[in-house]
Amino acid sequence: MDDLWQNILAHLKTTLSSASFNIWFAKTKQLDVQKGGGGIHLLISCPSSFVQDTIEKRFLGQLQKIGQELTSNQVTFSFQVRADRPPINNNLFRPLHLETPPPHPSSHPQLNPAYTFQNFVVGPSNQVAVAAAQSIANSPGSIYNPFFLFGDVGLGKTHLIQAIAHQLIANNPRTKILYTTSEEFTNDLIRGLRNQKMEFYKNKYRKIDVLLIDDIQFIAGKTFVQEEFFHTFNSLYMAGKQVIVTADSPPDEISGMPQRIISRFKGGLTIDIQPLDYETRRGILEYKIGELQLVLDSEIIEWLNNYPFKNAREIEGILLKLKTLSSLQHQQITLTTLNQMLGKNHLTTPSFTPKEVIKTTASFWGVKMKDLLGKGRQSKIATARQVAMYLCRQELNLPYTQIGRIFGGKDHSTVIHSVEKINQLFKTDNQIRQAIISIKSNLLK
């Protein structure tokens, strides 16, 4: 029984996303186990009261079910916050192991202390870029030089290159790093010319070990700035120093950039951070929920998980609004208040129809559409029908009577019963919850 909690976690890990598991369970620990009276009781430590509250509210029923399946006994749980716990750090995916410890937040005045590898959510859309960034952090100037990182706004380009800088300083505090933007690079050049201090300017940008420039596309078309950047780049590159730049598009697509600079960029490693996929979007969402200590019902979280946010800034902005509503205005967050809060600028009318809901649900369960619209009472068909009714209500907000008509003239009370039943199962039955998430994801594709 000493490893029962680990067995439960191993089972749980197969049903939760990596983000959810890492936030809520990775730092839990079994403190005690007692057996008697026909049941088993586990005492579990949590890293914070927030994690404890969330587990008790969102996952307790699921944990009890898993425990019973593993032991054939009733398993109960109690949780407590560790008295000797280290400071909480609700990080998600840990990318590649770094041999040195994370940098101290005050390590460099030009860098955002939050922009470290430890705070970067890694998923399929950015894992290649993260792996390359960490390789550069361990061997600057020797591989992947220059490093050209591009992608749309809000996908983490600045965070990632500053994470390189933080780790370089942690590896060697004497590393001379300069992080700047193309705008500041331009302004420094203008000040150097105006004040006749070009030597000071050149020393600032060329007598360093690592140069990081954000949004390099903004020097396009600025002939004199491009000329100075070209010579700065050559000076650093020939000295074996690392150059890292970001842009919103690949080198060849930056209009007005000289070919000789483009060829320099292409001589190193060019990688893009791709638009958020479902897994990465979900990871960022749950990380931000943990960071803001925002308590939301599972229904709201799943709705947000399936909303097509374009980038992390949109996710954080919406969660901050929810935080304001719940903590400052003391409003309960429901799907209705979420719609009212976001308004037409953020919420779109569902792009699918009741017919598509029924078709997708039937396909998921491996039954025919006519079975869902008929009177068949086989368990699989009945469950699929109830899920389809639930989705028509929750996703399309159709009246109960209209849903009844769609499903072969069912009475509205039958529809209400079906919707309420699935609503309860969504909270307690992981298979139903995962089925609904999968169906909704397919509908949003």
Image (cartoon, rainbow, N blue to C red):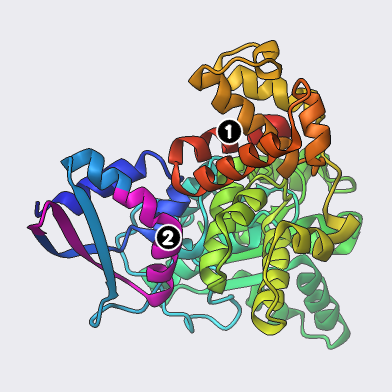
Under mark 2, the amino acid is Ile
Residue nearest the viewer, comparing 107 with 89: 89
Which quadrant: the C terminus?
Answer: top right
Q: Nearer the viewer, mark 1 or mark 2?
A: 1
Q: Which residue is mark 1?
A: 438
Whole-angstrom CA distance, mark 1 to mark 2, is 22 Å
Give the magenta part as a residue range.
Answer: 35-64
Label count reads: 2
Under mark 1, the amino acid is Ser
Q: Identify the residue at horizontal 66%, vertical 56% (top origin).
A: 245
Q: Position of residue 308 (x, y in %)?
A: 72, 45
Q: Is residue 175 left or right of residue 360?
A: left
Magenta residue check for 57:
yes
Q: Which mark is residue 23?
A: 2
Q: Earlier in the sequence, mark 1 or mark 2?
A: 2
Query: What is the quadrant of residue 367 in the picture?
Result: top right
